[in-house]
Amino acid sequence: MPPLLFTSSLKAPNGQSPVYDKIGTIPLYLYMPLIAVLNTTDISNESEWNEHRRVTAVAVHPNYDPTISVIKGYDIALLYLANYSEQPPMALYSGKPKAGTKATAVGWGHTVFRGQGSDILQEVDAPIVSNEVCNQPESYNGQIIDSQLCAGFAKGGKDACNGDSGGPLMALQDGKYKQVGIVSGGNGGCAEPNKYTYYTRVSSFRTWIEAQTGLLDDSESNLH
């Protein structure tokens, strides 16, 4: 079984539309090369890249439509790596976390809306928000579907931002951090009141992940 990473559906360089090639039922991006950098917090200095792996293929969920907003869901992809990582994989969260559960998002995105990305890995803690609250008229007005989840503060102030897309949202389960979501998008800038970040709910895609990889047992998973 090949080593894997998973993330949100990727955007082509220079804002171009992605090109697909159907291999079985898995659409693969044709532009390469892509490099996955692992086990680092500073991306500004290549000498600090403790581990990097060549990406050999990208499998995007077949229901993802790049021509429409990612708010429609299915914003998930699997990256196939040339070699296994030396890092232990993070387990996937089982089921749905309760509203109010503390979650942590990490990424190298902007620290302010329309600002600059960070060279140093950033993290933010935010509570899980129920889909009912996230679908209120002042938020996403019914657009968030069951395979997505939201996190953030009604008053705003801190949240994931541009450039964090594809990064993990983690929460404690059974005494250890597990990946509950993938940063997908937002609306109205960053950390605005009632405009929570929405995430791909990874528990909704366990069957798809297993179908593509043959993996599901977290203790033996090669997903990172």
Image: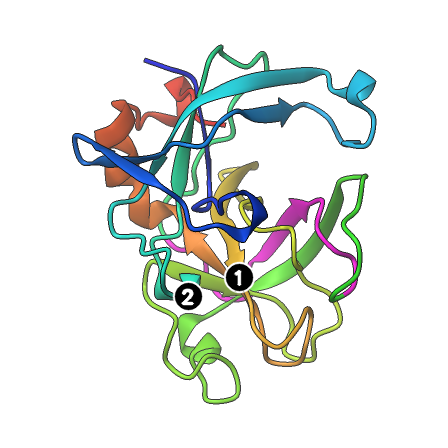
x 36%, y 41%: residue: 19
Classify 127 as above or below 25: below
Indicate the quadrant containing the N terminus: top left, top right, bottom left or bottom right.
top left
Other-residue count near label 1 (Cα within 10 Å), few / some / many at <14 / 14–19 / ≥20: many
Mark 2 or mark 1, which is nearer the start of the sequence? 2
Q: Which residue is mark 2?
A: 69
Mark 1 vs mark 2, foreground winner is: 2
x 51%, y 24%: residue: 89
Colour mode of the rendering: rainbow
Other-residue count near label 2 (Cα within 10 Å), few / some / many at <14 / 14–19 / ≥20: few
Task: Inspect the magenta stretch and tell me whether residue 97 lies in it.
Answer: yes
Badge 1 element: strand
Q: Which residue is mark 1?
A: 185
Classify 185 as above or below 93: below
Q: Position of residue 126 (x, y in %)?
A: 65, 61
Q: Nearer the viewer, residue 197 or 47?
A: 47
Task: Inspect the magenta stretch and tell me whether residue 38 lies in it.
Answer: no
Q: Nearer the viewer, residue 59 or 21?
A: 21
Whether label 1 touches label 2, CB < 8 Å: yes
Q: Position of residue 172 (x, y in %)?
A: 55, 44
Q: Position of residue 173 (x, y in %)?
A: 50, 42
Q: Nearer the viewer, residue 141 or 175?
A: 141
The stretch of residues the image draws in magenta is 96-112
Q: Report the predominant secondary structure element of the magenta stretch.
A: loop
x 62%, y 77%: residue: 188
Q: In the figure, residue 136 lies in which quadrant?
A: bottom left
User: Label 1 vs label 2: CA separation?
Assistant: 9 Å
**What kind of residue is marked 1?**
Gly
Return the residue found at the far bottom: 137
Classify 72 as above or below 220: below
